[in-house]
Image (cartoon, rainbow, N blue to C red):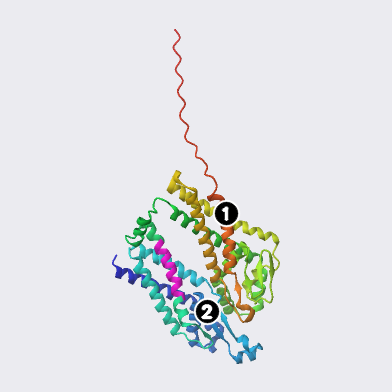
Amino acid sequence: MNRLLVALLAAFDAVIVVAVGLAVALAPLTVLWVFGLGGDADWGALWPAAAKVWQAGHLVPLQVHLGDEYATVAGIPADATRFEFSLAPLVFAVFTAVFAVRSGARTARAGAWIVGVCASTASVAVLSAAVALTSPVEAVTVGTWQAVLLPAAVFGAAALCGALVRAWREGDGGVLDRIRAWADVDDTGIVEASARGAAAALAGFVGVGALVTAVGIAVGGGEIIALFEAAHVDLAGAIVVGLGQVAYLPTLVVWGAAFAAGPGFALGAGTAVSPGGTSLGVVPGIPALGAVPEAPSPWLLLLALAVVGVGAVAGWIARSRLQAERGDDETFLSRIVVLAVMIVVAAAGAALLAAAASGAIGPERLQQTGPAPGALALAVAVEIGLGAAAVLLSPRTASASPASPAPEAPLPSPVD
């Protein structure tokens, strides 16, 4: 396909993903403006509010300045009216990343993935700049370079991954094919085995987090409902609050995964929520936090075995691929390489998820919430590594060779 056409289609993908993300942020706020604020609504603030929600969802930290008048009315210290809000509602980033992966894969299939990824990422940067410049708010400010680069980085990294995976599988007639020919990787199977194993490990780790989060919500359902009722919001407010918590569902899933792995997460400076124990101070009255266990059982430490099991399954997937590619030429060194790549990628992915799912939600002690990237990366490396090593480094079961047919017995001579 013509490179210019690929660039235009990729740029159109970028326009679509930004427009849909902004519409998702704008829709519930419009409901709140119409039914919650009524005739007193300031319609000029609707677009800036939606833009700030979209920016926060793409990891852009917001600088909140509530003003001295608010401090006087609310009865809070003046220094508590200025703080950073950086805990991202990751549903926006997840949507952008999924759409970007598909866009990158399409550009690779068209044979011009470098041009396509660059064009779409540049388009997201331009659109992000337009959003930042058209949505100034005195009470909530953002760094212009962060508002431009971070959404583009989310889209660009995901689009690049999608393009590389598709181009590696099907060939691109360009740089990747030359790399494969130079490194002669087609006959080793190490790249494919490592990639499949690492992807399975990360997917399984997130799946464990989703399961832990679902169980926590089911067990803490009564507390969640009580916090909803204590908020004393009307129907429009309840809808907005509910949708806001849905936007944070991927963030809660990462918290659940960190809880299962062992390090847990924080809900403020000096606090900890982990299977080994919970130490909390005053917790914000956010309904979703009703799922946080106040006194977890020590038996929950066994959740780490689920992560070890994920590593074992990922190791089996990687070894199956390695055996399919190399057959009897599978070596101990190749398995060691695959194991090392899986551990490094799983630990790096866990650290990246923890960094995206942590941040500040208020002044002072609330400037630290979420899992610690370093601790989570170490725990995931150990647990995934143990499970994968048990499968990858175990002796290969010798396949039974088909038995040779027994020689036929001579026919008895006829009796005269």
Q: Which residues are magenta?
A: 150-164
The kind of secondary structure the magenta stretch mainly shows is: helix
- Disc 2 element: loop
Label 2, residues with CA under 10 Å away: few <14, some 14-19, many ≥20:
many
Residue 113 point in image, percent of width and height? 35, 65
> Which one is in front, 53 or 382?
382
Seen in the image, is 88 located left or right of residue 155? right
Residue at image x 38%, y 75%? Answer: 123
Residue 385, located in which quarter of the rendered image? bottom right
Q: Kindly indicate whether the residue at mark 2 contacts the one at mark 1 (C-beta within 8 angstroms).
A: no
Residue 229, located in which quarter of the rendered image? bottom right
- Residue 22 higher or lower than 390, as above or below: below
Label 1, residues with CA under 10 Å away: few <14, some 14-19, many ≥20:
many
Given the current orientation, which residue lies at the most extreme left position?
Answer: 2
* Circle nearer the N terminus (1, 2): 2
Given the current orientation, which residue lies at the most extreme front position?
Answer: 333
The residue to which callout 2 is attached is 61
Numbered circle sitting on residue 123: none
> Which one is in front, 152 or 44?
152
Residue at image x 46%, y 68%? Answer: 97
Seen in the image, is 195 located left or right of residue 215? left
Residue 192 point in image, percent of width and height? 44, 55
The residue to which callout 1 is attached is 387
- Disc 1 element: helix
Residue at image x 28%, y 67%? Answer: 2
Residue 64, located in which quarter of the rendered image? bottom right
Identify which amino acid the numbered label 1 is placed on.
Gly
How far is mark 1 from mark 2, CA to CA?
37 Å
Identify which amino acid the numbered label 2 is placed on.
Pro
Residue 144 point in image, percent of width and height? 46, 82
